[in-house]
Amino acid sequence: MASKKTAKGAVAVEDAIVAGKETVEGAVKAGTEAATRALAIDRDQLKAATKGYSEMTDFGKDTVEAFVAASSATAKAVEAINAEVLAFGKSSFEDSVAAAKAVLAAKTLKEVVDLQTEYAKSAFESYVQQSSKLGELTAKLTKEAMEPINARFQAAVEKFVKPLAA
C-alpha cells in the first residue's frame, strides 16, 4: 500500500512539476511578448521623435536662412536709400550754388527776387519729388526684405497650426 501511495505521490509531484513548468513557460512567453511589444513601441516612438527633431532642426535652419536673406535685402535697401539721399543732397547743393551765383550776378533787385523765387519753387518741387521717390523706394525695399520672413511665417502656419486645426 505504501508503494501505491508513493506512486500516487510521485505522479502528483510530477503533475505539479509539469503544471509549474507550463506556468513558468507561459509566464516567460507572455513576458517576452510584452517586452517585444514594448520595444517595438519604443522604437516607433524613437523614430517619431527623431523625425520630429530632424524636422524642427530643418525648420530652424530654414528660418535662420530666411532671416539672413532678409538682413541682406535690408542692407541692400539701406544702401540704395543712402545712395539716393546722397545723390539728392549733391544735386540740391549744386542747385543752391548755381542759384547763389545767379543771385550774386543779378543786376537789379527784381532780378534777385525772380531768381530767388524760381529757385525756391524748383527746390520745393524737387524736394516733393524726392520724398515721393524715397517713399516708393522704401515701400518696395521693405516688401523685398520681408518676403523671406513672410514665407517662413506661412511655412510655420502650414506645419504647426493647420495640423492642429484639422
Image (cartoon, helix red, strand yellow):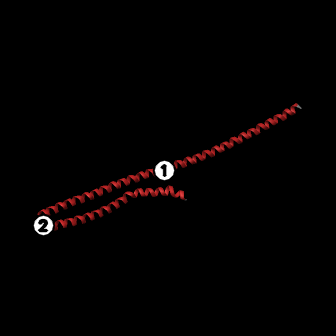
47 relative to 146 in the view: left or right: right
Q: Nearer the viewer, residue 32 or 79?
A: 79
Residue 75 percent across, percent down from the top left? 33, 54
Q: Earlier in the sequence, mark 1 or mark 2?
A: 1
User: Vertically, is 121 above or below 162?
Assistant: below
Q: Residues within 10 Å of mark 1 (few under 14, many from 20)?
A: few
Q: Quadrant of residue 78?
A: bottom left
User: Vertically, is 104 above or below 5?
Assistant: below
Which amino acid, mark 1?
Met
Which amino acid, mark 2?
Leu
Q: Nearer the viewer, residue 133 or 159?
A: 133
Secondary structure beneath label 2: helix
52 relative to 138 in the view: left or right: right
Residue position for label 1: 56
Residue 28 percent across, percent down from the top left? 68, 40
Residue position for label 2: 109
Residue pictured at 58% horizontal, 46% vertical: 43
